[in-house]
Image: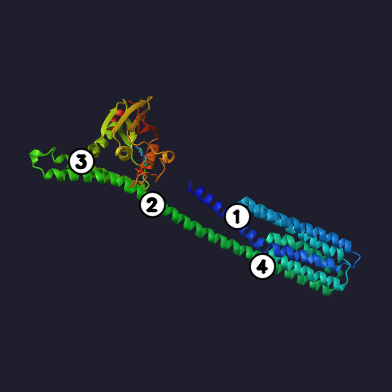
Amino acid sequence: MPGTKLLIARVDLSEQIASRLRAEQLTAVMRLFWAGTLSSFCNSLVFLFSSIEEDAFLAVLTWAIVVWSLLGLIALRQWRRRSISQRGPSNSRRGVQHLIFYAIALGVAWAALPFLFFAHASLGGRLLIACLTTGMLGGGVFMLASVPAAAVAFSGPIAIGALFVLLRVGDTQHVLIAVVLIGYLAVLLLGAFNYEKELKTLIATQIASEQKASASAKNLGAMADVTAALAHELSQPLSAATAHVQTAERLSRVPAEERSLPIEVPLRDAVTQLDNLRQVIAHLRNSIEGRLPEKQLLHLHKVIRSVLETNQHRCEQLNIEIEASLTAQNDAVVANPVQMRQLFSNLISNAFDAMENSAERRLTISSSAVEDNAIRIDVADSGVGISPAVKTKLFEPLVTTKAQGLGVGLSIIHSIVKEHRGQIWIEPNPGGGAVFALILPVTSLDERDEAV
Ligand code: ADP
């Protein structure tokens, strides 16, 4: 369902933006964190010193200790947070929540100041609290600008405390100061919200360009895979056709009566290979256009024999002994003929490669019935055996131990077998070498006569 896919992608994107935004917001706050903590500490210290001679000194000291404890707690949390290396989305969400909590606690502590000490203050005292408040508001909102919720949590209580003292007097002058204070805070918070909005847009743009870059990197990777598979599939019939034409050319230089075989034989084989090539290309075109490979009823033994025949030339060159024991009673499968050829061509060609340097060169292909509904084919060689380095990832693409290898043959085989609801695995050959065993479902005995 394409609609569902799209929805999931959108949810992911907005969560991605939100998570990156939180991380950026926290980083921005943390850049000013120590300066903000220090200024809060100095402000409380100045207030404490200015009240040394006053009766309320002990109360001020108690208040200052509360503020310092809060600052200490925040600093400790911050220090611990820095030592945690993992900064996942849940971590940044918790970080923002803690920040808001501490902002409100600190805001309330500062808001208590006018209530506790300036409720009945003189004009000078009220002006002092107005100045102190504007300073705290400016500094606090500046530090927390990237997290507007924390800026509101911190500045809200402080503004309420200051307004309480100023409006208590009730004369025009103090009401005016209160109005200016509200306007000042509104401008500060507006700036904070705008800053957050810009940050969000910036992050969304950044994520979009990152996704674009990673999509084109993936496309390039996919293109490399397709090119490798293409080169692999075309090279086998092409080199076989070349070999047959070379044989025909050699024969043409020998008088007709001395030829080891009629010149028509290699020429016919070359035509067969070129026809295979045409079929592989047609098949590739179908897959690129998204068409499912057409399946038909066919005899697997016939496919194997035909592949062995087309590999005859290389077999003779390498002096390989072939033993085909195709004895399964039912070999009729519903399969795509090109893919079946590809499957056995790849297995046989790999077996030949593996035996190139072996003293004994024997390829055994056998078939047997698996209950009533499947056929098992074993392709066993006496080659070098599977290298332990690639054993566990043999069917993955681009895995090869050969200098000229592309490492796509077995991954293609694996997907063909899967597409035909079969299984494939490897076993060591008891006498040395490897056995590729595969099982494919067969049709019912009544239908098999229709197979080609
Ligand atoms: P390529 O033949 O291009 O290397 P494949 O996917 O066909 O790609 O094979 C991957 C690897 O599997 C080979 O490089 C080889 O190491 C190993 N392999 C495949 N078939 C055999 C075999 N019959 N005997 C030993 N090793 C094999």
Q: Where does the image place residue 27, in percent across and percent down from the top left?
A: 63, 60
Evaluate whether residue 299 shows in this view. Answer: no
Q: Tell me whether circle 3 and circle 2 mark residues in contact (CB < 8 Å).
A: no
- Neighbour tally class for label 4: few under 14, some 14-19, many 20 plus, Cα within 10 Å: some
Counting from the top left corner in percent of width and height, residue 93 is at: 65, 53
Badge 3 density bin: few <14, some 14–19, many ≥20, Cα 10 Å: many
Toward which corner of the image does residue 296 lie, by quadrant?
Answer: top left
Instruction: Give the secondary structure at mark 2.
Output: helix
Disc 2: which residue: 224
Q: Which residue is mark 4?
A: 191
Q: Residues within 10 Å of mark 2 (few under 14, many from 20)?
A: few
**Side (left or right) of 346 relative to 162:** left
CA separation, marks 3 and 1? 63 Å
* Count of numbered marks: 4
User: Looking at the image, is mark 1 or mark 2 earlier in the sequence?
Assistant: 1
Cα distance in 3D space between marks 3 and 2: 32 Å
- Between the C-alphas of marks 4 and 2, the distance is 50 Å
Q: Mark 3 or 2 closer to N-term?
A: 2
Whole-Å distance between the Cαs marked 4 and 3? 80 Å
Residue corresponding to mark 3: 269
Q: Amino acid at mark 4?
A: Gly
Q: Earlier in the sequence, mark 4 or mark 3?
A: 4
Residue at the disc numbered 1: 19
